[in-house]
Image: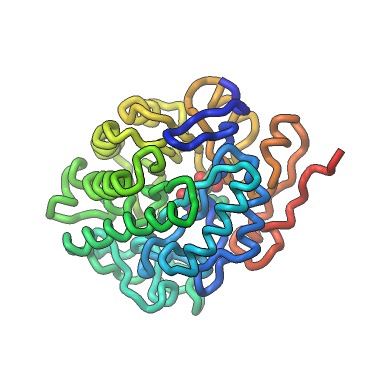
């Protein structure tokens, strides 16, 4: 297979297999409304096969970062409508990553609201809030009925994303946020049907994804996971437990016919990811994580070896709005500047140069 060939992931039509990975950039202000700058940023990158937006909060208490966009208010929906239509006008395809931050936040970030998680276990460390760095707070353990209300917030947010004109949603089950907190035995010590055994820890993610798929159509829904990523204290250090937990998850997702499974793992071609892919039975988007920036060579190799159907590319897409053109023509690339990843304004966001015309 060729990285530059088209592919259909469920209802999503991709012109090529280079996917813009979800990338939090914190440029949506206090209102969480994507404005002109955000519209321009995504519009510039519409040449990738699929844009997955930055993690976007489905309810106010789930906001994890200052300046993160939401999909809660009418103004936020209207902001995303402008993003989606700009991307579509340039022939692109775009889904929203719906991200509940779980315990990876603070009342000074989420508007003074409660901080929730599967269990009352705080992350050991500090978080950047609107009032500076502070220790992570002790989260409130969601009661079962509160978990069901949170599930409904994922469904309502996904409906609003589609209403705003996005082509679908990616449910964020990776990187130590709420859904990943349910999966990990380090952050989930519940004794009800959502904790204990691997099957129980997988249950909430299965329920959320199933409910979202029922609401907007499975062909528009993807899920991102990051087994063994060991980030933000969502530790998964026992391979047998990891396989049992994520195996239970993908076995139950298989009959739904989702658009894709996106996996962040340091060895996308290794046994774990390839077994999960086989049991999931659908398309795989791969990303090898933060260790090294995804290169053209790595992306080509993942597709040519048939280890993935598409490749999520993060930092290279930040730095190169026309990355597909550069990779296809083997042109030189701009280097990403990490200092502006989470900064404000156009610098390091919309001002990376395109290839010179002609
Ligand atoms: C600035 C930045 C923001 C990120 N934000 C998100 C996010 O919102 N959701 C997510 O699932 N992953 C996020 N990631 C992880 C990326 O999607 C990707 O997996 C990571 O950058 C590794 O890929 P790369 O080597 O191609 O950059 C982020 C990474 C970076 C560098």
Q: Residue furthest left?
A: 192
The spot of residue 154 in percent (x, y) is: 33, 56
From the viewer's perspective, tell me whether residue 147 is left or right of residue 92: left
Residue 216 versus residue 153: which sits nearer the camera? 216
Residue 245 is drawn in which quadrant? top left
Residue at 19%, 41% in the rendered image: 199
Residue at 58%, 36% in the rendered image: 18
Q: Residue furthest right?
A: 358
The spot of residue 96 in percent (x, y) is: 47, 51
From the viewer's perspective, tell me whether residue 251 is left or right of residue 282: left
Q: Classify the position of the N terminus by image quarter.
A: top right
Residue 59 versus residue 316: which sits nearer the camera? 59
Asked whether residue 280 is in view, the answer is: yes
Q: How many marks?
A: 0
Asked whether residue 184 is in view, the answer is: no
Residue 260 versus residue 235: which sits nearer the camera? 260
Q: Is residue 224 above or below residue 82?
A: above
The spot of residue 140 in percent (x, y) is: 25, 68
The spot of residue 157 in percent (x, y) is: 38, 58
Q: Is residue 355 above or below residue 53?
A: above
From the viewer's perspective, tell me whether residue 345 is left or right of residue 207: right
Residue at 38%, 29% in the rendered image: 282
């Amino acid at each position: 297979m060729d990285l530059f060939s088209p592919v259909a992931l469920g209802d999503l039509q991709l012109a090529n297999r280079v996917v813009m990975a979800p990338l939090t950039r914190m440029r949506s202000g206090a209102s969480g409304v994507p404005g002109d700058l955000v519209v321009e940023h995504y519009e510039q990158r519409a040449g990738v096969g699929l844009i997955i937006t930055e993690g976007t909060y489905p309810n106010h208490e789930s906001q994890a970062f200052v300046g993160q966009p939401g999909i809660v208010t009418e103004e936020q929906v209207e902001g995303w409508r402008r993003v989606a239509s700009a991307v579509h006008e340039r022939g692109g395809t775009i889904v929203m990553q719906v991200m509940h931050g779980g315990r990876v936040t603070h009342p000074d970030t989420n508007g003074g609201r409660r901080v929730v998680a599967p269990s009352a276990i705080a992350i050991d460390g500090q978080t950047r809030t609107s009032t500076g760095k502070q220790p992570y707070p002790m989260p409130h353990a969601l009661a079962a009925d509160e978990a069901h209300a949170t599930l409904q917030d994922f469904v309502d947010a996904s409906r609003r994303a589609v209403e705003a004109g996005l082509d679908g949603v990616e449910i964020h089950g990776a990187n130590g946020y709420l859904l990943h907190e349910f999966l990990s035995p380090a952050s989930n010590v519940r004794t009800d049907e959502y904790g204990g055994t691997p099957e129980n820890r997988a249950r909430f993610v299965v329920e959320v994804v199933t409910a979202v798929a029922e609401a907007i159509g499975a062909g528009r829904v993807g899920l991102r996971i990051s087994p063994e990523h060991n980030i933000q204290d969502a530790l998964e250090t026992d391979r047998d437990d990891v396989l049992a937990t994520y195996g239970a998850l993908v076995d139950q997702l298989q009959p739904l016919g989702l658009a894709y499974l996106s996996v962040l793992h340091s060895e996308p071609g290794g046994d774990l990811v390839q077994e999960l892919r086989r049991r999931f039975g659908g398309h795989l988007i791969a990303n090898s994580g933060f260790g090294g920036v995804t290169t053209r060579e790595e992306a080509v190799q993942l597709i040519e070896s048939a280890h993935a159907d598409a490749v999520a590319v993060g930092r290279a897409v930040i730095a190169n709005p026309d990355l597909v053109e550069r990779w296809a023509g083997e042109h030189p690339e701009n280097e990403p500047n990490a200092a502006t990843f989470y900064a404000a304004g156009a610098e390091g966001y919309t001002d990376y140069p395109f290839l010179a015309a002609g």
